[in-house]
Image: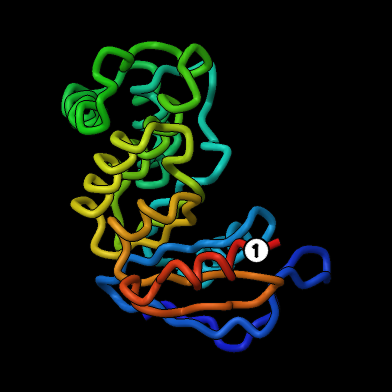
Amino acid sequence: MLKLDGQDIGHGGAPVLSDVRLSVRPGERVALLGRSGSGKSTLLGALHRAMGDRRVALVPQDTALVPQLSALRNVLMGRLDDHGAIRNLATLIRPRRADRDAALAVLARVGLTPEADRAVEGLSGGQQQRVGLARAIFRGGEIILGDEPMSAVDPIQAEVLAQEIRAAFPTAILALHDVGLAHAFATRVIGLRHGRILIDAPIADLDAATVEELYAR
């Protein structure tokens, strides 16, 4: 179980979220919802720190890709901390066939086989998001934490990518901007407003009135 117990979470001593109490059990798919600035990224960061030494796949909002490297090599970077510096350097210069084939298989799952050897800086925003997600899938782990990982792709692609996340990770916590996608993907919703958790409930309980309250100005 992943747990936060009454914590104030913020930056530089200024809390963004107050008295955060939540636990995430294995097998849950959690959607974090709320207006921009409500603290979704802050909460994801706290959950990441709470993971300790457990293996986690992270998809940050800015993707954290190396723009000069190819999509393939960015995917391979998902496992750099599994090996030493010499092995990693060799992997980035001339990947082993098994590693290359495994990375290509993941790129195929997100629809990027033709772009495998293109530098990431030449890809669109949506393609870069898919590279970031492919890197996370290639890394693997008990859980994936994603900060708006599908915000730059169209709704149909987003649903396909959500299915890939569901297939690759037993547990997921994703900050999402699309309420419809949250309904399709998540088993549970955590809604943030004014620095607090406004809703923490099964996704089936997320009705129109609650959404309106969550996003009201």
Where, quadrant-wise, is the C terminus in this rendering?
A: bottom right
Q: Nearer the viewer, residue 117 or 88?
A: 117
Q: Position of residue 151 (x, y in %)?
A: 47, 40
In the image, 51: left or right of 192?
A: left
Residue neighbourhood size for the residue with mark 1, other residues' Cα within 10 Å, grouped as few (<14), some (14–19), many (≥20) = few
Count of marks overlaid on the render: 1
Choose top left, top right, bottom left or bottom right for residue 204: bottom left
Choose top left, top right, bottom left or bottom right for residue 13: bottom right
Residue drawn at point x = 29 percent, y = 69 percent: 187
Q: Secondary structure at mark 1?
A: loop
Where, quadrant-wise, is the N terminus in this rendering?
A: bottom left
Residue farthest to the front, as pictured: 209
Please determine whether, in this image, residue 48 is positioned above or below residue 17.
Answer: above
Q: Position of residue 112 (x, y in %)?
A: 29, 22
In the image, 78: left or right of 17?
A: left
Choose top left, top right, bottom left or bottom right for residue 153: top left
**Hey, what amino acid is under mark 1?**
Ala
Q: Which residue is mark 1?
A: 216
Residue farthest to the right, as pictured: 13
Q: Nearer the viewer, residue 213 or 48?
A: 213
Residue farthest to the bottom, as pictured: 6
Please determine whether, in this image, residue 77 is positioned above or below residue 41.
Answer: above
Q: Position of residue 49 (x, y in %)?
A: 55, 67
Q: Nearer the viewer, residue 159 or 60?
A: 159
Residue drawn at point x = 82 percent, y = 70 percent: 14
Residue drawn at point x = 49 percent, y = 11 percent: 122
Q: Nearer the viewer, residue 140 or 107?
A: 107
In the image, 59: left or right of 61?
A: left
Q: Position of residue 23 (x, y in %)?
A: 43, 82
Residue drawn at point x = 41 percent, y = 62 percent: 173
